[in-house]
Amino acid sequence: MRTETLRRLNFRHLHYFWVVAKEEHLTRAAEQLHVSQSAISSQIRQLEDELGHDLFIRDGRTLRLTEVGSLVLGYAESIFNLGAELLE
C-alpha cells in the first residue's frame, strides 16, 4: 500500500509547489524554474488533486499557504534538503 502511494507522488509537482511556496508568487517561481505560469499552475493543481486538499489560498497574484500547504511545505523542505545532502 505504501509503495503504491509513493508511486503516485510526483516529485516535479512537489518541486514546483516548493518553489512557489518559497516565492509566494507564481510569476517569480515560473521565471526561476524557466517554465510557464500555466505549467506550474497545472502541476500544483495535480498535486492538490492527488492530496485531496488545496495547498494555497489565491489572493490576487499573491499565494498564501493553507494549513495543509504549510504541512506539505515542511515535508518538501525535508525531502529536498535530504536530496541535496545525498548529492554532497
Image: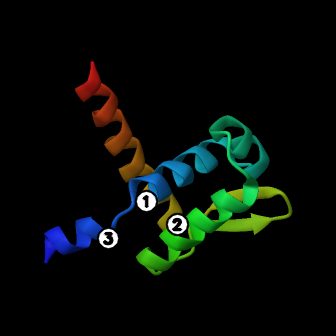
Q: Which of marks 1 and 3 is in front?
A: 3
54 or 13, nearer to the observer: 13
Residue lying furthest right: 60
Pointer 2 residue = 67
Q: Residues within 10 Å of mark 2 (few under 14, many from 20)?
A: some
Q: In which quarter of the image is the C terminus?
A: top left
Kindly identify the amino acid type of the residue bearing the numbered disc 3: Arg
Report the residue at 74% width, 49% height from top: 25
Kindly identify the amino acid type of the residue bearing the numbered disc 1: Leu
Q: In which quarter of the image is the N terminus?
A: bottom left
Q: Quadrant of residue 19?
A: top right
Image coordinates of residue 51 in percent, x first then y, are 42, 75
Report the residue at 41% width, 42% height from top: 77
Cα distance between the residues tagged 2 and 1: 7 Å
Q: Which mark is residue 71?
A: 1
Q: Which of marks 3 and 2 is in front?
A: 3
Q: Answer yes or no: do the residues labelled 2 and 1 have beta carbons within 8 Å?
A: yes
Q: Secondary structure beneath disc 1?
A: helix
Q: Secondary structure beneath disc 3?
A: helix
